[in-house]
Image (tube, rainbow, N blue to C red):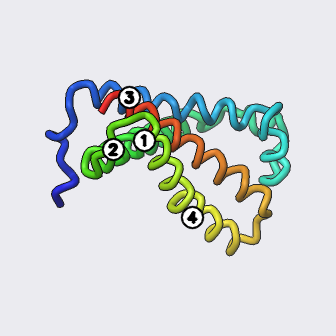
């Protein structure tokens, strides 16, 4: 698989990957704050504010999120290099398209069969599209 070439990533790309990984947390924190979509999201998943604030098991949740965010940033960077996407705008567009098709599509499928509300699907899909677009834009500045 020629596109999986860690050697093709320059030294500055790794800075971009680190920042793109961190951006997943920043976008999530903003997206799911109660004043944006947090309260509506909690209603869709059946959580109270107190339950959502419960820190039991949070280390594992944040750890898994960090690994997933890093792998997302890494693979997005590899795809950008393989496709010749080397600009902020190009990264933003590629991230948004991949977020829409793959992650948004997965939410549609899984939530549809789980009979969850379209509102939940829209909130989570929107988050993933924005998070991947931001990651792509960041990577575009460093690749």
Q: Residue at x 55, y 40 (%)?
A: 131
Q: Earlier in the sequence, mark 3 or mark 2?
A: 2
Q: Earlier in the sequence, mark 3 or mark 4?
A: 4
Residue 85's disc is 2
Residue 106's disc is 4
Distance from Cα at disc 4 to Cα at disc 2: 25 Å
What kind of element bears circle 2?
loop
Task: Check if mark 4's residue and mark 2's residue have beta carbons within 8 Å.
Answer: no
What kind of element bears circle 4?
helix
Quickly name the residue at label 3: 141
Residue 124: percent from left, percent from top: 67, 51
Viewer-proximal residue among 94 and 129: 94
What kind of element bears circle 1?
helix
Q: Earlier in the sequence, mark 1 or mark 4?
A: 1
Quickly name the residue at label 1: 91
- Frontmost of labels 4 and 2 is 2
Dot 2: within a 10 Å radius of its alpha carbon, few (fewer than 14), some, or many (20 or more) residues? many
């Amino acid at each position: 698989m020629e596109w999986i070439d860690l050697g093709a990533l320059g030294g500055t790309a790794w800075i971009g990957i680190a920042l793109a990984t961190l951006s997943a947390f920043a976008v999530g924190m903003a997206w799911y704050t109660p004043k944006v979509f947090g309260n509506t999201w909690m209603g869709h998943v059946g959580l109270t504010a107190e339950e959502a604030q419960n820190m039991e098991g949070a280390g594992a949740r944040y750890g898994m999120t960090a690994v997933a965010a890093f792998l997302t940033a890494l693979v997005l960077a590899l795809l950008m290099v393989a496709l010749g996407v080397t600009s902020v705008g190009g990264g933003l567009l590629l991230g948004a398209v991949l977020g829409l098709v793959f992650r948004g599509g997965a939410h549609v499928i899984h939530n549809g069969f789980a009979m969850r509300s379209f509102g939940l699907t829209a909130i989570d899909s929107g988050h993933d599209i924005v998070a991947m677009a931001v990651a792509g834009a960041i990577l575009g500045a460093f690749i």
